[in-house]
Image (cartoon, rainbow, N blue to C red):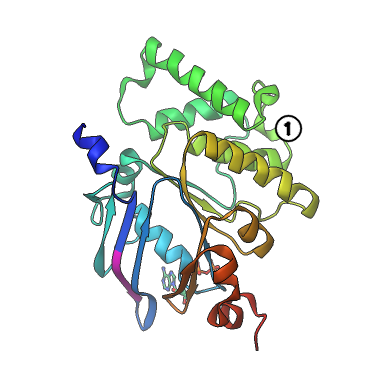
Amino acid sequence: MSAQAMQRTGPVLQASGLQKRFGSVVAASDMSLGVADGERVSLIGSNGAGKTTFVNMITGYIKPDEGSIMLDGRDITRLDPRAITRLGVARSFQIPQLYLGLTVLDNMLVATACHGRSLSFWRPAHRAEAIDRASALLERFGLAAHMARPVSELPGGVRKLLDIAMALTEQPRLLLLDEPTSGVSVEEKFPMMDTVMQALQQEAMTVLFVEHDMDIVERYASRVVAFYSGRIIADAAPQDALRNDEVRRYVTGTLR
Ligand SMILES: Nc1ncnc2c1ncn2[C@@H]1O[C@H](COP(=O)(O)OP(=O)(O)OP(=O)(O)O)[C@@H](O)[C@H]1O
């Protein structure tokens, strides 16, 4: 077995004892979380609970005061965001980061060039490979018909799908999604998430997604991690986590 394959028997992500203070605010207090290959973990919590701080520490935008973060057994705690992206942590934002004047395919190719782990993108062979990969992903996300259209002509839901597809161009090990259904209508949110989750399953992707909509959490997460006041207060299967008293009191507001 290769060294890389042996590494992959461990967790994809292992965060241990993360601490972060902003002045007197404790944004992360002893946060530990291990995520195995193929898990779909939903991060829940009310405003200010510490979800974004956790995600920003994983992606390198914030450095923890204490604790460590391992990706496939490699210590990424002190690496800069670009190096962490190159090692396989991809992220999609609540507001899609797209080039509105470019076509859907060109957005995918820009993402390939930006997330690229080598500088060979502009070589013809690599470019042809990138186009093949982009086309396959657009197919999986139901976006193939839009390939030649400028993003400015596309509705919000389609832009969200494109933003997530763009995060996958370089086959990351871990995908972080920030509220994938925010701003999506009630009628659109389930069909959109069905498409996203099916595509992610086909890619065997490990996903962490921040989500406020508990219907979405219950339906699509394999595991739920709940945050409150900078701490992880529950980490369990969706049914169990959403029944937890602390989660009902501090997150979903169903227990007073
Ligand atoms: N850069 C910063 N400077 C100062 N305080 C910060 C900073 N980032 C976060 N905080 C504080 O840390 C705490 C955790 O915030 P965080 O953004 O992680 O919460 P969250 O769970 O993501 O909330 P939301 O759902 O509103 O995004 C909050 O009290 C917040 O005000």
User: Image quadrant for the N terminus?
Assistant: top left
Residue count near mark 1 (Cα–Cα under 10 Å), binned few <14, some 14–19, many ≥20: few
Total count of labels: 1
Residue shown at 41%/31% (left/top)?
170
Residue shown at 67%/30% (left/top)?
142
User: Which of the two residues, 73 or 130, is positioned nearer the viewer here?
Assistant: 73
Residue shown at 30%/27% (left/top)?
118
User: Which of the two residues, 233 or 86, is positioned nearer the viewer here?
Assistant: 233
Return the residue found at the far left: 3
Residue 184 placed where, x, y %? 72, 51
Q: Which residue is mark 1?
A: 153
Can residue 246 be seen from the camera position used here? yes
**Residue 65 placement, left or right of 203:** left
**Residue 153 placement, left or right of 58:** right
Name which residue type carries label 1: Glu
Q: Which of the 4 quarters of the picture holds residue 20?
A: bottom left
Up-down: is 149 above or below 21?
above
Q: Which of the 4 quarters of the picture holds residue 138?
A: top right
User: Image quadrant for the C terminus?
Assistant: bottom right
Was residue 129 drawn as part of the magenta stretch in this picture? no
Up-down: is 55 above or below 103?
below
Q: What predominant SS class does the magenta segment belong to?
A: strand
